[in-house]
C-alpha cells in the first residue's frame, strides 16, 4: 500500500471514529428528545405547543448564531493553527481566553436586551392574526422571556464544545444536549401547582437544561486544564483572524436562521397547529441529519483544517470526497424511510392524548417534504466544512443569502395555493438551490471533487435505495391499518429492519465502498 493510500485510510478512520463517537452522543440526546416531544404532543393542546414553539425560536436562533454557527467554524481552524505554530500552548490559551471574554460580554448584553425587548421582538416575528389570540400571545411572551436566559448558557456550552472538538473530544459534547431533554422531561411531569401559569414548566426546563449543558463541559475543560478565563487582553492577531473569518459566517448563519424566522412568520398565520406540525416534522428530520451530516461535518472540520494547514491538497480532496459519499450512503435510506413511512412513524410516536388524527395527517405531510430536503441539507452540511477549513466563510454566506431570497420570494405564492405544504415545498426548493451553488463553487474556492467518480457511486447508492423504497412503499399500508399502537410499533420496527436489510445487502452486492467500510468497522468492533 502506498504512503498516500495509507494516509487516506488513516484519515478516514480518524474522521469516522470522531463521527461515530459524536453520533453516539447525539443519538442518546435525540432519543431523549423524541420522548420529550412525545410528552409535549400528548400532554398539551395545540395552543400551548404553538406558543412554546414560537417562544423557543428566538433563543434557539441565538444559540445557533453565536454558539454553533460562525464562531465555532471560524475558531477551530485558527486554534489548530495556533497549537501547531506554538507548541508551548501559550498562544492557544491566549486565544481561548480572549474569545471567551468577548463572548461573555456579547452574551450578557444580548440576553438582557432580549428579555427586556421580548414583546416587541415577537410582534415583529409573528403574523397579525396570531396576536389576536390573547391567551396564546401572552403565553408566548411569558415563556420566551423565561427561556431567553438559555441563550447565555447554551452559547457558552457551544464555545466549550468547539474547544473540546479542536482537542479531539467529541463524545461528551455530543452527549451534553441530552441534559436539556432530561431537564425538560422532568419539568414537564412536575405537578402543575408548582408553576403559576400553564406552560411555565416547559420554559423553566429549557433554562435549567442550558445551565446543565454548560456546567458539564465547563467541568470537562477544567479536567483537561483548558478552561477559558476572563482576561483584559482581548486583542491579538489570532482573535482578529477569528473575528475576520467570523463576519461572513455570521452573515451566512444569520441568513440561515433568518429563514427559520421567515417560516415562523408564515406558519404563525396559517392557523392553529401549523407551528407545531413544522416543529415535530423538523425534529424527526433532525435525527438522521444530526446523526449523519452534522456528526460527519463536525468531525471533518478539524481534520480538513489540519490537512489545509499542511497544504496536503490531494489528501484534502480524497477525505472530502470519501465523507461526502458516506453522507449520501446514509442519507438516502434515511430520506426514503422518512418519506414512505412518514404516517406510521408519526402515528407510533405521537398519536395519543391531545394529538388527533388531523395532527397526524398534517405532520406526516410536512415530514414527507422534509424527507426529500434531507438529501440537499445534509449534503450542504458536509460540503461546507471544506470552505471553512481553508478559511473561506463568504461562500456559505452568499449561497445562504441566495437560498433565503428565493424562499422569501416564492413562499407567499405557494402558500396561497397549497397552504402549509406550499411553505415547506418552498424551503425544499431553496435548499436544493443552495446545494447546487455550493457544488458549483467548491472547485474554485475550496477543493475540486472528482464528480465522475462521485456520480458512479451515487448511481449505485440510488439503485440500492430504489430497492429499499419498493419494500417501504409496499409494507407501509400494513402498519397504518394495524389495530393497536403496540402492533403498529412492532410492525414499524420490523419494516424498518427489513428495509435496512434490503439496503445493506443491495449495497454489498453492488460493491458500494461505503457499505463495505461500515461492515468492516462493525466486524472489528465486535471482535474487540
Image (cartoon, rainbow, N blue to C red):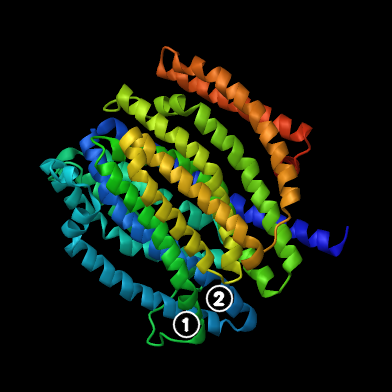
Q: Quadrant of residue 413?
A: top left
At x 36% / y 44%, what residue is drawn? 411
Residue 428 visible (yes or no) = yes
For residue 240, the mark is 1
Specify which label sits upstream in the sequence, 1 or 2.
2
Give the x, y percent position of residue 243: 45, 77
At x 46% / y 70%, what residue is drawn? 248
- Taking 467 as reference, is 245 above or below it? below
Q: Is disc 1 in contact with disc 2, using a CB cutoff of under 8 Å? A: no
- Taking 198 as reference, is 478 above or below it? above
- Disc 2 is placed on an element classified as helix
Give the x, y percent position of residue 470: 62, 23
- Taking 241 as reference, is 136 above or below it? above
Question: Would residue 183 appear left or right of 446 to someone viewing this image?
Answer: left
For residue 78, the mark is 2
From the viewer's side, name the closer residue of 437 and 251: 437
- Disc 1 is placed on an element classified as helix
- Taking 361 as reference, is 100 above or below it? below
Q: For the N terminus, give its image quadrant.
A: bottom right
Neighbor class of circle 2 (other Cα within 10 Å; few <14, some 14-19, many 20+) is: many
Q: For the C terminus, give its image quadrant.
A: top right
Neighbor class of circle 1 (other Cα within 10 Å; few <14, some 14-19, many 20+) is: some
C-alpha span from label 1 to label 2: 10 Å
Give the x, y percent position of residue 7: 78, 62
Amino acid at each position: 500500500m502506498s504512503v498516500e493510500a495509507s494516509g487516506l485510510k488513516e484519515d478516514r478512520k480518524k474522521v469516522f471514529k470522531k463521527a461515530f463517537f459524536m453520533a453516539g452522543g447525539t443519538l442518546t440526546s435525540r432519543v431523549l428528545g423524541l420522548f420529550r416531544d412525545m410528552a409535549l404532543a400528548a400532554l398539551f393542546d395545540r395552543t400551548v405547543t404553538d406558543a412554546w414553539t414560537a417562544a423557543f425560536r428566538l433563543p434557539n436562533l441565538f444559540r445557533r448564531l453565536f454558539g454553533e454557527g460562525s464562531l465555532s467554524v471560524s475558531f477551530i481552524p485558527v486554534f489548530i493553527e495556533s497549537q501547531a505554530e506554538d507548541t508551548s500552548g501559550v498562544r492557544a490559551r491566549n486565544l481561548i481566553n480572549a474569545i471567551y471574554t468577548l463572548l461573555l460580554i456579547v452574551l450578557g448584553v444580548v440576553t438582557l436586551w432580549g428579555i427586556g425587548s421580548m414583546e416587541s421582538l415577537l410582534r415583529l416575528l409573528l403574523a397579525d392574526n396570531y396576536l389576536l389570540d390573547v391567551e396564546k400571545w401572552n403565553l408566548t411572551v411569558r415563556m420566551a422571556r423565561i427561556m431567553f436566559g438559555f441563550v447565555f448558557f447554551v452559547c457558552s456550552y457551544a464555545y466549550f464544545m468547539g474547544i473540546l472538538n479542536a482537542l479531539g473530544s467529541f463524545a461528551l459534547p455530543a452527549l451534553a444536549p441530552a441534559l436539556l431533554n432530561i431537564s425538560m422531561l422532568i419539568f414537564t411531569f412536575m405537578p402543575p401547582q408548582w408553576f403559576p401559569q400553564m406552560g411555565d414548566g416547559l420554559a423553566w426546563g429549557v433554562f435549567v437544561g442550558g445551565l446543565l449543558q454548560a456546567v458539564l463541559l465547563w467541568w470537562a475543560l477544567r479536567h483537561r486544564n483548558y478552561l477559558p478565563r476572563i482576561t483584559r487582553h482581548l486583542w491579538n492577531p489570532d482573535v482578529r483572524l477569528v473575528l475576520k473569518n467570523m463576519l461572513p459566517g455570521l452573515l451566512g448563519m444569520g441568513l440561515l436562521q433568518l429563514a427559520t424566522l421567515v417560516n415562523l412568520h408564515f406558519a404563525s398565520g396559517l392557523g392553529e397547529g401549523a407551528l407545531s406540525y413544522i416543529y415535530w416534522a423538523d425534529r424527526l428530520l433532525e435525527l438522521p441529519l444530526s446523526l449523519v451530516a452534522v456528526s460527519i461535518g463536525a468531525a471533518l472540520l478539524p481534520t480538513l483544517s489540519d490537512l489545509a494547514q499542511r497544504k496536503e491538497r490531494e489528501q484534502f480532496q480524497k477525505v472530502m470526497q470519501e465523507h461526502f459519499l458516506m453522507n449520501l450512503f446514509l442519507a438516502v435510506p434515511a430520506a426514503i424511510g422518512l418519506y414512505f413511512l412518514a404516517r406510521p412513524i408519526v402515528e407510533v410516536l405521537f398519536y395519543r392524548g391531545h394529538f388527533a388524527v388531523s395532527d397526524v395527517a398534517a405532520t406526516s405531510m410536512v415530514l414527507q417534504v422534509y424527507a426529500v430536503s434531507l438529501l440537499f441539507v445534509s449534503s450542504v452540511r458536509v460540503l461546507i466544512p471544506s470552505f471553512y477549513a481553508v478559511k473561506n466563510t463568504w461562500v456559505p454566506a452568499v449561497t445562504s443569502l441566495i437560498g433565503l431570497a428565493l424562499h422569501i420570494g416564492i413562499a407567499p405564492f405557494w402558500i396561497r395555493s397549497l397552504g402549509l405544504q406550499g411553505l415547506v415545498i418552498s424551503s425544499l426548493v431553496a435548499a436544493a438551490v443552495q446545494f447546487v451553488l455550493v457544488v458549483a463553487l467548491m472547485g474554485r474556492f475550496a477543493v475540486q471533487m472528482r464528480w465522475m467518480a462521485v456520480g458512479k457511486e451515487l448511481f449505485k447508492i440510488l439503485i440500492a435505495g430504489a430497492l429499499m423504497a419498493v419494500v417501504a412503499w409496499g409494507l407501509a399500508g400494513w402498519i397504518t391499518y394495524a389495530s393497536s399502537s403496540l402492533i403498529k410499533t412492532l410492525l414499524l420496527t420490523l419494516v424498518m429492519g427489513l428495509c435496512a436489510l434490503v439496503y445493506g445487502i443491495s449495497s454489498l452486492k453492488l460493491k458500494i465502498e461505503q457499505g463495505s467500510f461500515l461492515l468492516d468497522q462493525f466486524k472489528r468492533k465486535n471482535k474487540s
